[in-house]
Image: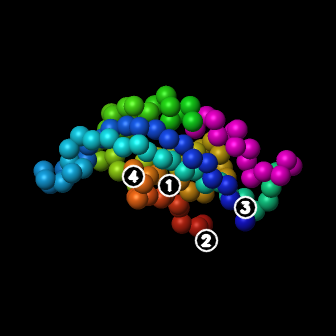
Amino acid sequence: MFRITKEFHFSASHQLKGLPADHQCARLHGHNYIVEVELSGEALNEHGFVRDYHELAPLKRYIDDCFDHRHLNDVLGHDMVTAERLAQHFYDWCKDRLPETSAVRVSETAKTWAEYRPAAVR
């Protein structure tokens, strides 16, 4: 199995409503997010790639246009925008356009990551 990853960055705010008032994430706050997209394949294409990294440019545009310096509650239309939900959102977006997408990881801080990786089809 071959795997490639590419990293994207954006800054945005969010607020996790419904948490106890003293929870730090209940307050409006922001992060410098990192999105890491993983693509996998059993074989390489005729150019020796799982997928040419340049073909991920639409994801960069999507992130820059819709997520960077935005309030994520407004972007996704709900008040529970967690790193886990962002990972699933970006996975679904990528999988629709890049069938080799196998996982997406999202980081809010240098020490935290959330990953969405569907269970293997049996």
Residue 50, given in percent of the width and then of the height, sits at 74, 52
Q: Which of marks 2 and 4 is nearer the N terminus?
A: 4
Compare residues 51 and 107 and report the one nearer the observer: 107
Q: Is residue 44 magenta?
A: no
User: Would you identify the image quadrant in which residue 112 lies?
Assistant: bottom left
Q: Which of marks 3 and 2 is nearer the N terminus?
A: 3
Residue visible at 48% across and 47% down in the picture:
34
Determine the CA span between mark 1 and mark 2.
23 Å
Q: Which of marks 3 and 1 is nearer the N terminus?
A: 3
Question: Is the residue 23 above or below the residue 65 in the image?
Answer: below
Residue 61, given in percent of the width and then of the height, sits at 56, 31
SS state under label 3: strand
Q: Bounds of the magenta span? A: 46-59
Which disc is residue 105 wearing?
1
Residue where numbered disc 3 is placed? 2
Residue visible at 50% across and 47% down in the picture:
35
**Circle 1 or circle 2, nearest the eye:** 1
Q: Does the magenta stretch include residue 49?
A: yes
SS state under label 2: loop
Left or right: where does residue 80 sit relative to residue 106?
Answer: left
Q: Earlier in the sequence, mark 4 or mark 3?
A: 3
**Circle 2 or circle 4, nearest the eye:** 4
